[in-house]
Image: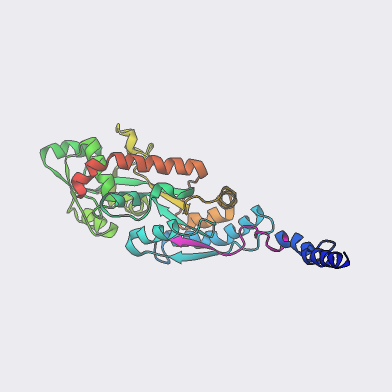
Amino acid sequence: MERYNQGRREFLKLVGIGGGVLSGLVHLPLAFAKDVYPAERITWVVATKAGGAFDLIARVSGPYLTRYLKESSKGAKGGEIMIKNVPEAGGKRAYNNIFHANSDGYTIGDFNTAFITDTITDKIEFDCNKFTFLLRTAASLRLILTHKKGFKNWNEMMKAGKEKELKWAASNFGRGHHVACILVKEAAKVPARLINFPGAAENANALVRGDVDIAIMAEESAKPMIDAGEFRALTVLSKTSPYPGVPSIAELGYPELADTLKVHRMIVAPPDLPTEVTNILLSGFKKLFANKEFLAQAKKMDFTPDPLYGADAERMAKSLFKYIDEKTPILKKYLM
């Protein structure tokens, strides 16, 4: 019996009853407690070269966002933003990196919704619909323009096209601007031949020289030339027009093109980001876009925030993707 009792005492001592090993085990959950997010640096993937507009916005945003993430998540010891520029392949590589990163909140990045048009002609190794859409940061306008000696308005342009086919500078083949031209041409029956150029600069130069009758451009590039009297806007691809006397595409009778043809800039994360992490990031971004100091800096860089958050951003993006998918048969006539 004594031998049994001794063995029992040794067993109890081994498992820690009364302050032994079991006592240590009780503290294991504390020793292995999950770190409060964010506990380390966050990589912000930018799909453009360093020094570009959206690279600068990310770099300006970083310090503010770090501060607000720590405010939103008490006890967080990380959150510093590291910018990673991945400009190769027109954004595809950057978006691929974001999509396949761990869904832990330590990789986020820019996403341009115009990229969805690349999926029509190119094999993409990820599903854009499955990103975690954190927010839309801004929505850039596109304009249809003529040169300073060109048409006085949209109606005059359409009338002239019935007499002679117009030449329309449509920028890079298969990219967002080109697809926007196709959709406007098809919807409005614009009597024009689309001519592609290697980039936005060549597109604008062709219009300046009068080599083409009309051109498509992003507002950021077009506005200085409009202000200088070199270009005249014929329509703005949106619901309303900020230019007096210039109709929006919706006002011309094509409201379905208004939001879908804007250039929506998003911040996304990998699929299935945990809700808790998503909410912390959203809280940080909401404080960032309400900060007057940040907004003043953004204005100096000609960046006008137009944020949509969480479910609203996701709904907008997926609606755009659906529209492009429905128009794929038409687009393939021009792109394949």
Magenta residue check for 46? yes
What residue appears at the point 32 percent right and 38 percent down from the top-left corner?
Answer: 257
Residue 259 image-quadrant placement? top left
Magenta residue check for 331? no
Q: Nearer the viewer, residue 220 or 188?
A: 188
- Whether residue 80 is visible here, answered yes or no, is yes
On the rendered structure, is 178 left or right of 161? right
Q: Position of residue 260 (x, y in %)?
A: 35, 41
Q: Position of residue 231 (x, y in %)?
A: 28, 50
Segment colored magenta = 30-47
Q: Position of residue 225 (x, y in %)?
A: 32, 53
On the rendered structure, is 249 left or right of 275? left
- Whether residue 247 is visible here, answered yes or no, is no
Residue 98 image-quadrant placement? bottom left
Would you place residue 66 above or below residue 289 in this image?
Answer: below
Q: Position of residue 333 (x, y in %)?
A: 19, 44
Q: Nearer the viewer, residue 314 or 83?
A: 314
* Secondary structure mostly seen in the magenta stretch: loop
Outermost residue toward the front? Answer: 1
On the rendered structure, is 148 left or right of 112? left
Q: Nearer the viewer, residue 53 or 155?
A: 53
Residue 191 image-quadrant placement? top left
